[in-house]
Image (cartoon, coloured by chain):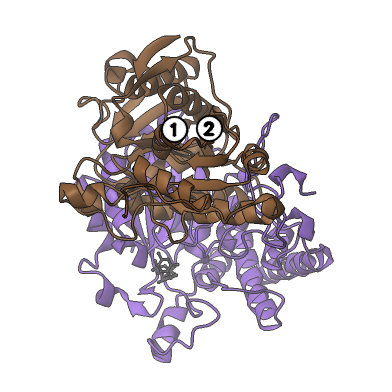
Amino acid sequence: MAEHPLPAAQTCLEWLTKMNLIRRFEERAGEQYTRAKIGGFLHLAIGEEATVVGAVAALRPDDYMIATYRSHGQTIARGSDPGRVMAELFGRVDGLCRGRGGSMHMFDLEHRFMGGFGIVGGNLPIAAGFGLTSDYLGNDEVTLCQFGDGASNQGTFGETLNLAALWSLPVVFMVTNNQFGMGTALERHSAQTDLQRKGESFGVPGMECDGMDVVDTWKVTSEAVKIAREQRQPVLVEAVNYRFRGHSMADPEDYRSEAEVLEWSKRDPLKTFAERLIAEGVITEPEREAIDEQAMATVDRAVEFADASPAPEPGSLYEDIYVLGDQVRGWYSTDHRGAGVRKGEDLS
Amino acid sequence: MAEMRYREALNEALAEELERDPNVYLMGQDIGVFGGAFKVTEGLLERFGEKRVRDTPISENTIVGLGVGSAMTGLRPVIELMTINFSLLALDQIVNHAAHIRYMFGGQVSVPLVIRMPQGAGHQLGPTHSHSFEALYLHVPGLLVAAPSTPADAKGLLKTAIRDDNPVIFIEHETLYGQRGDVPAGPDFTVPFGQAAIRREGTDVTIIGISRMAITAGLAAEQLAGEHGIDAEVIDPRTLRPLDLDTILDSVRKTNRCVIVEEGWPHGGVGANLAALIQEQAFDYLDAPVGRVTGVDAPMPYAKNLEQISFPHEAEVIEAVLALFGERSVGLNG
Ligand SMILES: Cc1ncc(C[n+]2csc(CCOP(=O)(O)OP(=O)(O)O)c2C)c(N)n1
């Protein structure tokens, strides 16, 4: 893929800073997981930072972004406070979702990061729903929906692309082809391995970007976003990348060779971008080190913040199951902790 | 007051809410040009246009997902699924997303979505088109469940559902669409959620009927009074979540006996759930075990005679009530 000229120095710095922060955040999250500070599944995006940051860079603040269970980076790139993301991983009350969602279900309405979804392929219809709202209200907001190569085999993929094309919805669908759906390699799970072509029968144009190159990802996504915004139609972008860590923390990685990982790691998106910025004189080596130190310090503070945040009150268990109106009648919830039945609003 | 059919009452509710709130829109298979599989949406496309009344492809899960996404971002979708059996294709979006998004995202968004669909047997549509799934949706925290049995409730509850900020599973009944009844006039008429209707006052036994079974329960109560001297109180909960348990418990404390009638399956059914709640809350008032009359524990058969014995009729309700009094009805099972 052709190398694009770099954008303005300030922009480059911003991207490097974000990619660096996400890398350090993910590394620290992995570490905290092994120390049992984090429960459940933890899917890290190490190796996928350029795809995340490049895609987000193509959006306006009022555009919608939606992703999968692998989305700490996306919400941070959108502007979420890393401390609150870490607190969510720790299951604390100051987490983005007050400890209700965990690693797989990040959400930050303020920054229009519209979730973290744990169901493979489940976020595509919802993304189209955001697009429908933009269309219905007649504004020019665009939705960017990221999902994995594995998700492109779900029924929702075909159903959603059909509907989005039929109804001319301004949604950019980005399939992040990291070569595997869990432990199943692309060519073993998809009959069509040129994923950008998977929307062809619906008339959804396909594009491809180098998901290991933040500049290319940004350029191609920007073009797709422009088409969605101006021509009011969906676009499918395939971001080709590679995840350096296991699918989740519970992955012995028997399905790929160390040599393969090593080969891809030569294209480490963070390292190559930093080296390019130094080579082209945008930053100096000490500046690069300072950016990294700053990222480490931010992550340190995030862990401190998360550690200091209390666990949610047991009494909050029933909060936000329902929107309770002014004149609530009837029993909304049955409390399993005893024979007694309580009204949802009575639980304080 | 105007007399109208159940389907017309629903149509009127939809039209009034479309009129009232520009962010309300309808979507579903064949609801526009075709007028709806059961003609509930007839005339609405002509009146409100394609933006507000949307014919969709046959993609249940994705349609519901679109509804969820648009509800999260400010619209108020009302989705029609052709029958409740087809909602099983959308169970992922309904349960994993519509019901849980508010909770799992810490209350940052709500999902004001209505999913309307008919259930029920009686038209010989066999095992993929005739089931009753109130229990399935009642099971899920985060969903509200309404099941109107009269035209007035159909209209009033649907309007409340559309105005509510929670995802509402709105269960209509296939055999009720043509039923007539008085419906209060005017766009301000609504029926609140969580308020059961006492269809008949009585002192001897409480019969709770769910969805169409509220009608069956009412007919059985008249026979019990006329032929057996038993004065039954008939309750239609109207919404299963929120549940007006207070009205049910007050009645049971008065009558000391209770029978629950539903069309769905017995295991894990609405009746099983209500019976548990009643015995937990009013055990000391019960003079007999809580009785249940349910659909049979089998898929819905096609053959007319088999279908007819697969869901409750008045005779089974009467038999169940008499059993609570230690009696058996003459001529039923000898
Ligand atoms: C409906 C559903 N089926 C299975 C899973 C379990 N699962 C979680 S991630 C995953 C692999 C998905 O691969 P891909 O879409 O390529 O995304 P990636 O994890 O590589 O980013 C699977 C099978 C799930 N979460 N949801």
Front residue of B265 and A47: B265
Task: Specify few, some or many for label 1: CA neighbours under 10 Å numbering under 14, 14-19, or 20 or more.
Answer: many
Residue A265: x and y, percent? 47, 80
Q: Foreground residue, A342 or A45?
A: A342
Q: Residue furthest left?
A: B303
Q: State the residue position of label 2.
A: B74
Q: Chain of mark 2?
A: B
How busy is the neighbourhood of tag 2: few (under 14 within 10 Å), some, or many (20 plus)? some
Q: Colour of chain A?
A: purple
Q: Are marks 1 and 2 in contact (CB under 8 Å)?
A: no
Residue B213 x %, y %: 41, 39
Q: Which of the four quarters of the rendered structure image does ligand 1 lie in?
A: bottom left
Q: Name the side, left or right, on which A97 lies relative to B322.
A: right
State the SS at label 1: helix
Q: Is residue A60 visible?
A: no
Q: Amino acid at mark 1?
A: Gly
Viewer-side label of 1, 2: 1
Question: Where residue A193 sits: x, y (%)?
Answer: 24, 68
Residue for badge 1: B218
In this rendering, position of residue A207 left or right of residue A287? left
Q: In the image, which lettered chain appears brown? A: B
- Element type where label 2 sits in the image: loop
